[in-house]
Amino acid sequence: MSIRQAIEKVEARYAHQPEFVQAVKEVALTIAPLYDAHPEFQKMKIFERLVEPDRIIAFRINWENDKGEVQVNRGWRVQFSNALGPYKGGLRFHPTVNQSVLKFLGFEQIFKNALTGLPIGGGKGGSDFDPKGKTDSEIRRFCYAFMRELHHYVSKDMDVPAGDIGVGSREVSYMYAMYKNLTHEYSGVLTGKGVGFGGSLMRTEATGYGAVYFLENMLKVQNDDIKGKKVLISGAGNVSLHAAEKVCMLGGIAITVSDSKGTLYDEKGLNQEKIDWLKKQKDQGKPLTDYIEVFGGEWLAGQTPWHIKADIAIPSATQNEVDEEDAQKMVENGVKYVVEGANMPLTAKAIDRVCENRVHYAPGKAANAGGVAVSALEMSQNSVRQYKTFDQIDERLKNIMKNIHDSAAAASEEYGQTDNGYIDYMAGANIVGFKRVADALVAYGILN
C-alpha cells in the first residue's frame, strides 16, 4: 500500500476525527521520499501500523464537588507506540479533550520523542474535566479519582505520563500521591513532580526555553541572531512565558502574550520584572488586562497577535490557533521565522502559506520537544536516585535542541527537501523521527 493509499484509508476510517487525520496527513506527505527509499517499510506496513495505537484506554471518572454533588467526566489514555521506550506523553484536562485530540497528540508524540534521541515511546491522555473555576479541593478530588482509574495502566517502565494543558505540578503531585497510595511504590511513574520529591529542576522552563534554543539554531544557519528582533508570542501559560523569558535573556524583544480574551501588546518589550509579574498573575488566576495599569501597553480585546509587525512568531497557545488568514498577516507584517511552541498551532493551510513565502518554519514536534526531553531526564534521575543541577540540565537541553535541529536540517538536505538554502524542517523532522521508530519496528518483526 502506498502512502497516498494509506492516507485515504485513514481519512475514510477516521473522518470523525479531524485533528488526528490532519496530523497523519502532515507526517505522511513529508515522509514519502523516505518510504520510497526503504521498501522494507512498505513491506512491513510500518506506516499502517503506526497510525493505529497499540491501545486506547477509556474510563469514567466519578467525583464530588464542594457541594457534595456527584460529577461525571470521561478519561482516556492513548498508548500509541513503545518501539523506542515506555509510552511517554502528557495528560490534558480541558473541556475540548476527546479521542481525536488525544490521538493527534499521541501520534505527534511518537516522532517528537524519537527526535530527542532518548529512549521513550509515544502516548497521550487526559479528560474533558475543566479545572477553570474549580477550587483546589475539587481539583484534588478529581485528580485522585482520575488516578484511581489510570493507575492500572501506567508504571515507570510501561507508561510514564506528564503534565499538559490544565495539568501542572499541583495536579501531577495529587495524582502521584494517589498512585503511591494504591501501589505502595515510590517510583518515577509521573514526570513534572515537585522538586524535592522526584521532580527535575528546569522542567517548568524546558518547553519554552527549548523552543527558543531551536530558534537560535535556525537563525545561526541563516547567519542571523535574535538580538533586537521583535517576537510575537501567543498564550500566557508555562510555555509562552518561559519562551518570552528566554527571548529576553538572549536580547530579543517579546512584545505580546495572549489568552482567550485577547492580546497584550507592549511595544517596549517584556523584561524580567514584567514576566515575573505575569507569572504571578496567571498563578493567581487574575486577568492579563491588569498589566496595563501597572506597566502600560495596549490590550487588544478579542484579537490574536498575528497582525502586529514583528520578525519572529512563536505560537504557544493551542492547536490550530493560526489559520491561513493569520499566516498571511504574518507574512505581510515581516515575520521571517515561525516556531511552534504549542502542538500543531498552525493549520495545514497556514503551514502552506508561510512555507510558500519562504518563512522559516519549525514544527512543534521539533521545536517544543524540550519539555519531553527534560521529562525523560527526570525519569533517568528517578531511576538512579540522583539529581542534576539547573545548569547541567540546561546545557543538556541546549545540546538536545541543537541535535534535533541539525538532524532535521540534514534529513531535509539528504532527501531533496532543501531548496536553495531554505530548509524544510517539517519534512526533516518527520523523516528523522519516523525512521528511528520504523527501524526499530522492522527489527522487531510484527509484534509491535
Image (cartoon, grey):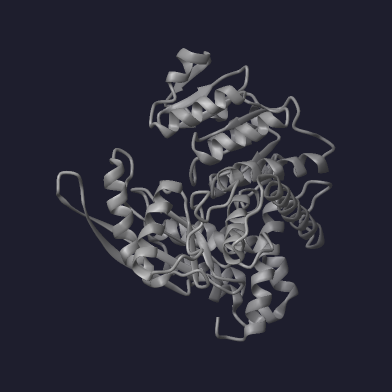
Instruction: Give the percent coordinates (x, y) of residue 314.
Output: 61, 37
Q: Compared with residue 324, is residue 344 higher up or lower down, i.e. above or below?
A: below
> Quarter of the image containing the N terminus?
bottom right
Q: Position of residue 37 (x, y in %)?
A: 75, 73
Residue 328 visible here: yes
Residue lying at 47% horizontally and 50% vertically, measured from the top left: 164
Q: Residue at x 47, y 19 (%)?
A: 291
Residue at 42% across, 52% down: 173
Is residue 322 visible to the viewer in this orientation of the structure? no
Q: Looking at the image, is 447 positioned above or below residue 223?
A: below
Quadrant including the C terminus: bottom right
Quarter location, residue 443: bottom right
Give the x, y percent position of residue 100: 41, 59
In the image, 401 versus 281, the foreground residue is 281
Tell how many labels: 0
x then y, percent, for residue 134: 28, 41
26 vs 371, nearest the viewer: 371
Residue located farthest toward the left when viewing the structure as drawn: 68
